[in-house]
Image (cartoon, rainbow, N blue to C red):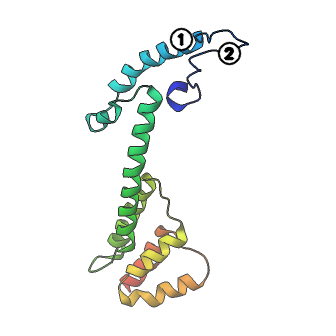
Amino acid sequence: MGFINGTNPCPPAFLPVVADIKPQPNPAHAVWYRHDKALMPVLISSLSEEVMHLAIGRRTSREVWLSIEQSLASSSRARSLNFLDQLQSLRQGDSSIADYIGRARVVTKDLALAGRKVGLDEMNLYVFRGLQPEYQNLTTSRWVCGQPVTLTKLIEFLGDQEFI
């Protein structure tokens, strides 16, 4: 892992110059290079076809890893923004309270998997905003009480109101 994550960096190709002596090759560099070259096929063989092109032209296993990491981070940010947009635009419509909050829960879990956790306050804001108008007064009283509400408690509370 040290070759891939950078904790075992490549030593310099030449030993430090001492006095007027010609620079000498660094034996540690040659050993490191051989080990890294042996690791490259293992790393590349573990890649899926979708990311294989990211390994082309890379000279070290670290370069391959950084290329993949940067590419996936960009796509993960895009996914996260997409899920956040879904959560912000979520509306109850004709759905029951349980279905509506269930959809919010799914999007929240997708956001967490994409690396963006949503706190209870933020979740309450988005869920309350998308409720049908007849629930707005009820949620306002919950919001004003100062404590965020878990989705489970919200389903219980609003489900009771839906039943009534």
Q: Which residue is mark 2?
A: 17
Q: Which dot, 1 or 2, sits closer to the camera?
A: 2
Q: Is residue 135 above or below residue 43?
A: below
- Name the foreground residue: 7 vs 121: 7
Q: Quadrant of residue 147?
A: bottom right
- Name the foreground residue: 105 vs 114: 114
Rendering coords of residue 145 (x, y %): 60, 83
Q: Quadrant of residue 38?
A: top left
Residue 110 seen in the figure? no
Q: Which residue is mark 1?
A: 31
What amino acid does circle 2 point to? Answer: Val
What amino acid does circle 1 point to? Answer: Val
> Residue lying furthest right in this view?
19
Q: Label 1 vs label 2: CA separation? A: 20 Å
| Element type where label 2 sits in the image | loop
Rendering coords of residue 89 (x, y %): 35, 74
Q: Is residue 70 above or below residue 28?
A: below
Residue 123 seen in the figure? yes
Q: Quadrant of residue 43?
A: top left
Which badge, 1 or 2, is on the more N-terminal residue? Answer: 2
Rendering coords of residue 137 (x, y %): 46, 90
| Element type where label 1 sits in the image | helix
Binning the other alpha carbons within 10 Å of mark 2 as few (below 14), some (14 to 19) or many (20 upward) gives few
- Name the foreground residue: 123 vs 25: 25
